[in-house]
Image (cartoon, rainbow, N blue to C red):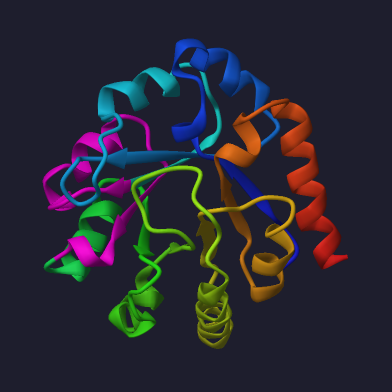
Amino acid sequence: MTDINISPSLLSADFSCLIDDIEEVEEAEWLHLDVMDGHFVPNISYGPCVISAIREISDHFFDTHLMISEPEKYISDFAESGSDAITVHAEACDDLVEVIDMIKENGCKAGVSLKPGTPLSDIEKVIPDLDLILIMTVEPGFGGQSFMHEVVPKISEVRDIITDIDKEIDLSVDGGISPETAPEVVEAGANVLVAGSAIFKGDIKKNLYELRNSALNTIK
C-alpha cells in the first residue's frame, strides 16, 4: 500500500457556500457524502438531489455513505445521483449479500461500514465481494467527535484479511481523523482517510495539505 486518498466529509462544510468549499478541496481525491435519515442515526443530512447537484460541479470520486435504515430501498436513487461508491452499514442490512449485489448492479463500487462496537466477524464472509470497507472510529451520526483509539486493532485486522485474499479493496477510516491521528490509522493499514472538521474548520487548503503530509510521512 503506497497511495493515500483523502476524502473530505461534506457534513462539516459550510452549506451556505458549498461550491466554494468544494473548490477548496479540489486537490483531494474523494468526497465523502454522509447521508443520514434520523432513524439509523440521530441526525438528518441530505439526499440524492443534493448529491446530483454536487455532481454537476465536481469531478471527485463520490463515496456515498448511507447511514440509513433499509438502504436497499434507495440504492438506485443514490447510484443515479452520481455516486461512484455506495457504502452501507452492516448493522442496517437484513441481507448484506443482497444489498452488495444491488450496489454493483447499479454500477457502483460496493462498500460496507462498521460501527466501533460491531465485530469484524459480521462482515468476514462478504469481504471478498467488497470494493471498500469503512471502519468508524466514532459513533456515526455527528461530526466533530473524538477519535476512538481502541478501534485501531480492527483496522489492522481488516488490512491483514485484505492482504491474505490478495484483492484490491480500499480500507477507509472515518471519525476524528486529523494530522495527529492520521499516522495511527495509516500505520494500521488504512489508505482512505475521511476527515470533516479537521479539513473544513479554518484554512481549508492548509488543513488538507497538513493532513496529507501527516499521512504520507507515515509511509515514507
Which residue sits furthest front? 146
Q: Judge left or right: residue 64 versus residue 177.
A: left
- Tell me the residue at 21%/48% (across/down): 68
Query: Which quadrant of the view contains residue 95?
Result: bottom left
- Where does the image place residue 77, in percent across and percent down from the top left? 21, 35
- Where does the image place residue 125, in percent across and percent down from the top left? 31, 83
Considering depth in this image, is 215 or 80 the residue closer to the camera?
215
- Where does the image place residue 211, in percent across and percent down from the top left? 74, 46
Looking at the figure, which quarter contains the C terminus?
A: bottom right
Considering depth in this image, is 49 or 198 the residue closer to the camera?
198
Q: Is residue 83 magenta?
A: yes
- On the question of residue 29 being in view, the answer is no
Query: Which quadrant of the view contains residue 185?
Result: bottom right
Q: Which residues are magenta?
A: 66-93
Q: Is residue 106 magenta?
A: no
- Where does the image place residue 180, in percent across and percent down from the top left? 73, 56
- Tell me the residue at 11%/67% (across/down): 94
Q: Judge left or right: residue 213 versus residue 26.
A: right
Residue 141 in the image: above or below residue 133: above
- Tell me the residue at 79%/38% (across/down): 209
Looking at the figure, which quarter contains the N terminus?
A: bottom right
Q: Judge left or right: residue 61 versus residue 111.
A: right
Considering depth in this image, is 158 or 17 the residue closer to the camera?
17
- On the question of residue 128 being in view, the answer is yes
